[in-house]
Image: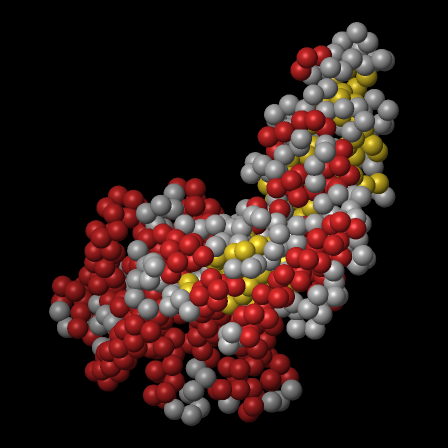
């Protein structure tokens, strides 16, 4: 399961950096101001590539994550991309006479390893070399010494770049750099330039700056202004051989990246490959734009006007990069899905389309101004909290509920920014965590509210009212203490709710009891408002409360089991009929086929003995994965190749056996469905739960952590 925090600041700036690279190669302000163009392309634009290096270092190198496997994967992927880019630009190199140069082979080798076979491709070999050097420096020396060593390399490069005017005045240094320039064309490369930024990225991943984003922004602006002065002075003095490396570029990038790291949350830009594609293809787009302008005789617009030229190249590059990124992502998702299923022993399959359909169905029947509160407790009822919460928020759900503070923190780390209500108990000693992660805590009684208030930390809370279930909550008649909570200094009451414990029943006694609960709750709401306090958001209905009492006027509906497209039991009566679809399927595969003859037995305690020669399929899933052991019976079935096959013998911790004698062409690797639909036949969770004397909620939530969650559309 992917639970990595989403750094939306970094993701967003990838696109900004890619557009800055295009600016470097198109000089958008050259028509209007030579100095303005210098500042944009030779100073502001020079932060783009260091940012890309730091981003790679941030995710590749840290005290806990730098590993040979990650490095090898990075080098392999970047090498493949570099090879494809070299091949893609061969026609352009032929056109511009690249292969007609003197000393062709030595120059090709130099370009492949250092300068790039086209002017922008140097970034890829620099990434490979910079990653390798930085990784080994950190691994061998630790971060502080690695930074110092990388800084030495950077200083050497500095005097062959922006400060070359000083070096060439000293014979020794002039000779030294003359030798270096025979090996590579620029000191802006993977040996002298890239390592420092990879190390800095790793440092920030390991020890992020604790100051606010405002402080980081101020420090960045100060550093950048000093870099601006440095660059303008060097330009005026004529010292620059090249203009990629500045002294103040180091602190400017450090504080810029720290500022960007401050922004985490919902992943806004899923196509992370698009900026890299944009970087690689934009020279090709430049050529195409120029050719098109000449054919249409519009050079005066699309070439001679530098800003129009830049904008045209940028728009076309963005369009093609997004198109290619979507195409690549689609292929990759399909391959990943097939690969996951091929490698998995057993898995939960989640239909995001069905999940989205259910959320919309529920919302469509809610009263005006009533919103869905998606209940994600117990790993989203076994459906996978990451997959469920991130997709629901993406489709517009703004409120979530969990059972524990740790579940709430987990959602925040997934990038969920919406409101999160903790339905259960949290130790008052964790009040600062409630504040830090912007979690809303349920107040379970008055003494608990007092303890939480005494922590001195501002906490948002919903008051739970016990209207008859006698579990958590203030007694509905204890209105004095409920009102006292509104007066507490450190408690911000944003909601009040109760739970209808018999709303899934239509017996006269249960209906009467539910109506009493509803009456008690609204009587308390009236008392609060008559006491001079504005009643906060209210919610009464969970899934059955909404399905059977849809007429209630509330601010939220807490949808749990209904959100996942099933009822707790197949026999539960429902007043409101909705077009809900099951979200979860449980699947495994056949890993072994055994021939069992009459007189032999199968499984523990020899509970199954076939009446005829049989074929038994062994399936690698058991009660440790959440399948109840009391489903061990020939009257319980699975689906294989669209056919029902009985479970035989006792379900083991890690395996179970299925009789496939009467099913043709069963082979090792065939998919086995325990919950779900196949070829018009269905095994539904409520029916399975009924057979074991339980409910769907329990069946789902017991599914073990060993099961991988695979999402499908």
- Relative to 312, 346 lies left or right: right
170 lies left or right of 346: left
595 or 452, which lies in front? 452
The residue nearer to you, when weighing 337 against 113, is: 337
Residue drawn 72% across and 45% down?
568
**Which residue is depicted at the point 45% across and 64% down?**
485
Measured as percent of width and height from the top left, residue 621 is found at 65, 30
Q: Where, by quadrant of the figure, is residue 355 drawn? A: bottom right
* Front residue (pair 355, 130): 355
Give x and y (percent) for residue 387: 59, 52
Q: Position of residue 341 (x, y in %)?
A: 65, 40
Image point (69%, 46%), residue name: 584
Residue 595: in sight, yes or no?
A: yes
Q: Left or right: 15 with respect to 315?
A: left
- For the question of whether residue 11 can be seen, the reply is no
Would you identify the image quadrant in which residue 459 lies?
bottom left
């Amino acid at each position: 399961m992917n639970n990595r925090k989403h750094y939306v600041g970094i993701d967003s700036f990838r696109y900004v950096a890619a557009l800055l690279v295009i600016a470097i190669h198109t000089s958008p302000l050259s028509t209007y101001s030579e100095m303005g163009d210098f500042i944009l392309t030779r100073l502001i634009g020079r932060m783009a590539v260091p940012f890309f290096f730091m981003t790679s270092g941030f995710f590749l190198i840290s005290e806990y994550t730098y590993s040979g496997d990650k490095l090898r994967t990075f080098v392999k992927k970047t090498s493949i991309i570099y090879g494809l880019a070299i091949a893609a630009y061969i026609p352009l190199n032929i056109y511009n006479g690249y292969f007609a140069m003197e000393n062709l082979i030595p120059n090709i080798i130099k370009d492949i390893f250092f300068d790039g076979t086209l002017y922008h491709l140097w970034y890829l070999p620099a990434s490979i070399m910079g990653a390798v050097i930085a990784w080994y420096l950190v691994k061998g020396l630790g971060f502080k010494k690695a930074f110092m060593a990388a800084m030495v390399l950077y200083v050497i490069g500095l005097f062959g770049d922006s400060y070359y005017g000083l070096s060439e005045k000293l014979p020794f240094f002039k000779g030294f750099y003359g030798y270096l320039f025979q090996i590579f064309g620029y000191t802006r490369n993977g040996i002298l330039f890239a390592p420092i930024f990879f190390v800095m990225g790793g440092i920030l991943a390991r020890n992020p700056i604790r100051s606010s984003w405002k402080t980081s922004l101020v420090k960045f602006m100060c550093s950048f202004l000093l870099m601006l002065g440095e660059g303008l002075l060097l330009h005026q003095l004529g010292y620059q051989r090249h203009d990629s490396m500045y002294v103040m570029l180091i602190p400017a990038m450090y504080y810029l990246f720290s500022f960007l790291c401050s922004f985490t949350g919902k992943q806004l830009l899923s196509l992370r490959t698009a900026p890299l594609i944009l970087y690689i293809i934009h020279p090709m787009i430049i050529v195409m734009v120029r050719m098109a302008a000449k054919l249409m005789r519009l050079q005066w617009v699309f070439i001679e006007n530098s800003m129009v030229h830049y904008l045209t190249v940028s728009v076309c590059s963005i369009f093609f990069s997004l198109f290619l990124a979507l195409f690549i992502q689609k292929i990759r998702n399909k391959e990943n899905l097939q690969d996951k299923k091929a490698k998995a022993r057993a898995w939960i399959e989640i239909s995001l389309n069905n999940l989205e359909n259910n959320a919309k169905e529920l919302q469509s029947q809610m009263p005006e101004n009533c919103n869905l509160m998606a209940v994600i407790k117990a790993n989203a009822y076994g459906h996978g909290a990451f997959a469920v919460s991130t997709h629901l928020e993406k489709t517009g759900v703004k409120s979530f509920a969990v059972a524990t503070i740790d579940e709430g923190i987990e959602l925040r780390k997934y990038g969920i920014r919406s409101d999160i209500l903790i339905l259960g108990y949290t130790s008052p000693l964790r009040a600062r965590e409630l504040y830090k992660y912007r979690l809303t805590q349920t107040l379970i009684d008055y003494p608990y509210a007092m303890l939480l208030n005494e922590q001195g930390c501002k906490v948002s809370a919903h008051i739970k009212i016990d209207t008859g279930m006698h579990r958590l909550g203030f007694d509905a008649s204890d209105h004095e203490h409920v009102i006292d909570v509104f007066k507490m200094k450190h408690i911000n009451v944003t909601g009040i709710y109760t739970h209808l414990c018999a709303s899934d029943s239509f017996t006269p006694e249960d209906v009467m009891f539910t109506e009493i609960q509803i009456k008690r709750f609204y009587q308390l709401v009236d008392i609060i408002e008559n006491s001079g306090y504005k009643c906060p958001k209210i919610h009464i209905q969970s899934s059955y409360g909404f399905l059977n009492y849809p007429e209630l006027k509330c601010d939220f509906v807490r949808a749990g089991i209904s959100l996942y497209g099933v009822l707790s039991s197949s026999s539960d009566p429902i007043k409101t009929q909705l077009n809900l679809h099951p979200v979860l399927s449980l699947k495994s595969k056949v890993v072994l086929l055994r021939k069992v003859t009459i007189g032999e037995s199968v499984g523990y305690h020899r509970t199954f003995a076939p009446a005829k020669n049989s074929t038994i399929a062994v399936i690698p899933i058991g009660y440790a994965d959440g399948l109840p052991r009391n489903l061990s019976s020939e009257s319980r079935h699975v689906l294989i190749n669209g056919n029902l096959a009985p479970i035989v013998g006792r379900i083991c911790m890690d395996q179970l056996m299925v009789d496939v004698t009467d099913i043709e062409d069963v082979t090792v690797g065939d998919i086995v469905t325990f919950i779900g639909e196949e070829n018009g036949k269905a095994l539904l969770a409520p029916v399975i739960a009924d057979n074991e004397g339980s409910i769907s909620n329990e069946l789902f939530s017991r599914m073990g952590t060993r099961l991988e969650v695979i999402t499908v559309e």
